[in-house]
Image (cartoon, rainbow, N blue to C red):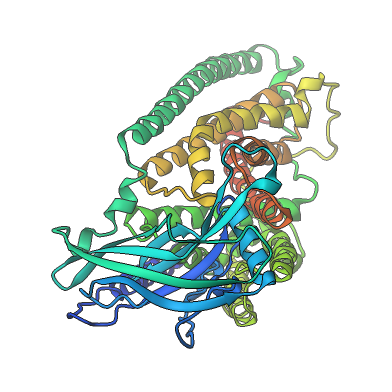
Amino acid sequence: MEMKLVPCLVVSILILCSVTRVRSDASNHRYKVGDDVPLYVNKVGPFHNPSETYRYFDLPFCSSGPTKDKKEALGELLNGDRLVTAPYKLDFLNDKDSKIACKNKLTKEQVAQFREAVSKDYYFQMYYDDLPIWGFIGKVEKEGKNDPSEYKYYLFKHLHFTIFYNKDHVIEITAQSDLNSVADLTEDKEVDVEFMYSVKWKETEIPFEKRMEKYSQSSSLPHHLEIHWFSIINSCVTVLLLTGFLATILMRVLKNDFVKYAHDEESAEDQEETGWKYIHGDVFRYPKYKSVLAAAVGSGTQLFTLTIFIFLLALVGVFYPYNRGALFTALVVIYALTAGIAGYTAASFFCQLEGTNWVRNLLLTGGLFCGPLLLTFSFLNTVAITYSATAALPFGTIVVIFLIWALVTTPLLVLGGIAGKNSKAEFQAPCRTTKYPREIPLLPWYRKTLPQMAMAGFLPFSAIYIELYYIFASVWGHRIYTIYSILFIVFIILLIVTAFITVALTYFQLAAEDHEWWWRSFLCGGSTGLFIYGYCLYYYFARSDMSGFMQTSFFFGYMACVCYGFFLMLGSIGFRASLFFVRHIYRSIKCE
């Protein structure tokens, strides 16, 4: 079944790549002198609250005529983009000097609305021929005054557009506000505002194919790369020391164990066994809540497959900067298409554990990750609707996502489950399980589940924490992140450390004659997700300026879902590594 799914996934990736190429080529327009090049205003919002964005015309900006919404793709809507025709007219190669875009007489309420936006550092975002433009809507003059009531608030009225072109292509655009052309918003009184703009065209030799490189290169500056490579070297040294140290210990201990057990079998058949061989009749005893464990392993395997395909798309250049919504589209489509992997893995493993109600197990697999995600989304979408923010998804988009889940995800999950149930795979336990379980000896506190999870999660987290800052600054800020190759290396290191530390802790657990390793290995593997959520707390309060109920809800709500996904994914990695290890060591000795 898994082999049959691979061609389908590859085809889906090729379709995604082609769709993205079409999306990127859609702006490959050739213009003549005087042609109307589309300029869209997108959204406004507090600079430090990236999730709290509003439609451009939610603020009382004026328009030169009737506005028209641009049709958005699924990923763009998920990204919160709401493009509308702008009041500025930037015809190809037509210079303009102080042209009036529109006039507006602001009421007291509108002045107060603008003043509040300026005080919160509101920025605007526009797109010109699919090139992004940003700027602040106004400024606050404090002039050394400590009392906020004495601050002066100004609204920028004049925008200077500088546009670079190469033959018949638009290559680059910048927008600069005239700091001397402002409207005073300090007092609650009516204000007449003339929004003006200037346009200056300049020729450049940068080819059209390289016009997005300036955004990609911002995250590849030498001092940034030095930090990234330092992070990787630090992680690699950690991995080498850890794996070398643990491998040496495990190899020597296991070798001594094998020699000792072989000697015991030859010299004294009735001698009492000790250590991990002592529990060979219990180590493969099926765990409690095996349906939940099978569902967790299935969901984690699906999320791991999703992550690998996302990395493949990133490495081939699909997620270039400001390819609006491409990442969200890929996440939704690939998650839907990989549902069969979750169904197959969970049902197959559940049947190997001699489970009977595979239908209930399949339902649990389908809801284990999607259930919490749906609850979180429902709450946060309600918050966004209350705030009238662009993060609130339109009803039509919610229907589309529901149809994808109902018509693609669910059928593939069921088909995968049926294939897994019919795979007739056996568990392949090297040792027979005794009828009654042995009593687990009293263990010191540091061998309990929570201390073991703390030890297991800290080492993988220490290998990725430097890279986490840049990812957070990109997702929850305005920094651009494009060094996907380095991120992929860090991800591989994370997997290696997670697998190795989980195997080591599983061995020490078995050596202490504690045979309940199934859930422990999953929890230890996934504990890195809890450390990442702990880092979320640190980042929010110490490294960011985010504030407000909506932004706080979005940050901690969606990061909880992401960390839960990491918990499932790394938990399944840790469990599979431990299962392979346990099978291997018990296959290497004679079990009665």
Percent position (x, y) of residue 120?
Answer: 62, 53
Q: For this rendering, which residue is in front, 314 or 582?
A: 314
Question: In this view of the protein, can residue 553 be seen by the observer?
Answer: yes
Question: In this view of the protein, can residue 75 be seen by the observer?
Answer: no
Percent position (x, y) of residue 552?
Answer: 70, 51
Q: Image quarter for residue 101?
A: bottom left
Residue at image coords 32%, 64% = 161
- In this rendering, the answer to whether 214 lies above or below 253 is below
Percent position (x, y) of residue 393?
Answer: 62, 73
Q: Image quarter for residue 462?
A: top right
- In this rendering, the answer to whether 215 lies above or below 284 is below
Residue at image coords 35%, 30% = 226
Q: In the image, is 42 to the left or to the right of 283? A: left
Residue at image coords 34%, 45% = 218
Q: In the image, is 467 to the left or to the right of 436? A: left
Q: In the image, is 537 to the left or to the right of 234? A: right
Percent position (x, y) of residue 189?
Answer: 66, 68
Q: For this rendering, which residue is in front, 404 or 11?
A: 404
